Image (tube, helix red, strand yellow):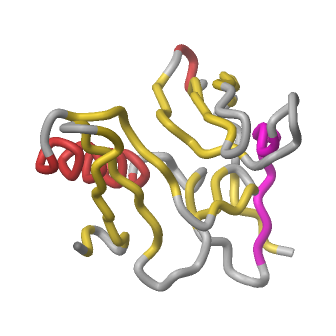
Amino acid sequence: MIYGGFEIQSFEAGRGLWHARIQRADQEPVVIDGMAFPTLEVGFAWSDQEAAIADAKAHIDRFKGTSGRISIPLPEQTLQATPVLSTCPDCTASLAVLRIIPGRAGAEYWTMRCTRCGGIHLDIIKATAVPVTI
């Protein structure tokens, strides 16, 4: 399913527990605060497929309101941003974004899961990303 320029893939994560994965429809990585993610695992396990898809759509809609923090920079641009934790501090495998929660003063709380050891990591991101022309 394509929604807002993203492909949504729902899947059953466990018996009766639905989850969603999103990626750009053009197969390019999503760039969040200067870090490239080929796909994003979003939300929690939902009791039905429609709820998982609705949650993924809500995440996509939220991306549009982030003032350039979640974007695909053009070749002549770069992002100036707070670094985001992208590898597991325990085993150095990549991290999948589970949830982004708005915080105070424009900050966001990112919950991520390690793709190898399954560890859960929280990162607090300050809203400072601005596209800059080189």
Q: Residue at x 46, y 73 (%)?
A: 24
- Front-most of residues 107 and 53: 53
Where is residue 66? Give x, y as percent: 48, 46
Instruction: Judge whether residue 43 can be spotted in this image.
Output: yes
State the count of labels. 0
Rendered-image quadrant of the C terminus: bottom right
Instruction: Determine whether 95 is above or below 32 in the image.
Output: above
When the figure is inspected, residue 124 is found, relative to residue 93, above or below; the finding is above
Q: Residue at x 70, y 47 (%)?
A: 129
On screen, 7 above or below 124?
A: below
**Which residue is depicted at the point 37% across and 37% down?**
43
Residue 1 point in image, percent of width and height: 22, 73
Left or right position of 129 against 55:
right
Quarter of the image for residue 18 reads top left
Chain part drawn in magenta: 77-87
Q: Quadrant of residue 125?
A: top right
Residue 9: where, in percent of width, then height?
A: 32, 64
Out of 51 and 35, give the one closest to the viewer: 51
> Can residue 82 be spotted in the picture?
no
Q: Is residue 81 magenta?
A: yes
Give x and y (percent) for residue 59.
35, 46
